[in-house]
Image (cartoon, rainbow, N blue to C red):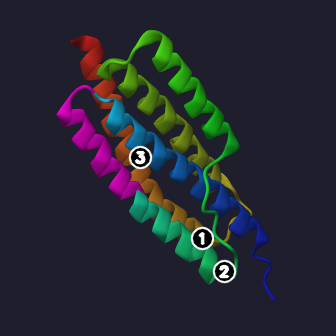
Amino acid sequence: MVDTSHDIRTLNSLIASIIDSIDGYTESAKDADSGRFASIFNDRAAERRQVLTRLQAEVVRLGGNPEDDGTTAAAAHRGFINLKSAVTGRDDKAVINEVERGEDHLKSKFEEALADSDLSSQVKAVVQECFASVRQGHDQMSALKHSMAAG
C-alpha cells in the first residue's frame, strides 16, 4: 500500500489556498468600483472553482477527505481588509493591489508544491495542470496592477 498522506496534505493545503482565492475574488468583485473589474474578478473566481474541483477530485481519488474550507490566515487577512476598507474606503486600485498580493501568495504555494521532491509524479502532474490557471491569474492581476500604476 502506497502512503498517500503527503500527497493528500499537500493537495489540501493548495485547496485551502484556492478557496481563499475564490473568496478573495468574490469579495473583490463586490468591492470593485468598475463593472469591468467586477467581471474580471467573477470570471477568475469561476475559473478557480474549476481548479478547486480538480484538486478535490484528486484527493478523493487518493482516498482522502478534500479540504472544503479556506485557511485561518486568510480569514484573518479578510478581516484586516474589511477593517482597512472601513477606515480608508476602497477604490479599484486598492482592490487590485490586494488581489495581486493574494495571487503572489497562491503562486508561491503552487511553486513550493511543484518543487517538492516527495510529491508523487501523478499528483505533481495534477498540480502542474492547475498551476497553469494560477499563473495565468497571477499574470493578469499583475498586468492590471501595473497598468493602473502607470495610469
Density class for disc 2 (Cα within 10 Å; few <14, some 14-19, many ≥20) is some
The amino acid beneath tag 1 is Val
Q: Is the magenta region chiefly helix, strand or loop?
A: helix
Horizontal and vertical percent position of residue 107? 51, 43
In this figure, which residue is indicated by the disc labeled 2? 62
**Mark seen at residue 99:** none
Q: Using residue 44 as the reference point, say whether residue 76 is left or right of it.
A: right
Residue at disc 3, secondary structure: helix
Residue 50 seen in the figure: yes
Q: Which residue is pictured at 57% across the width and 75% down the height?
A: 58
**Mark seen at residue 135:** 3
* Whether label 1 touches label 2, CB < 8 Å: yes
Horizontal and vertical percent position of residue 104? 50, 35
In this figure, which residue is indicated by the disc labeled 1? 123
The amino acid beneath tag 3 is Arg
**Quarter of the figure with the C terminus:** top left
Q: Earlier in the sequence, mark 2 or mark 3?
A: 2
Give how far apart the Cα atoms at labels 2 and 3 are: 25 Å
Density class for disc 1 (Cα within 10 Å; few <14, some 14-19, many ≥20) is many
Q: Which residues are magenta?
A: 33-48
Q: Earlier in the sequence, mark 1 or mark 3?
A: 1
Q: Is residue 7 above or below residue 25?
A: below
Furthest-front residue in this view? 86
Horizontal and vertical percent position of residue 43? 28, 50
Q: Nearer the viewer, mark 2 or mark 3?
A: 2
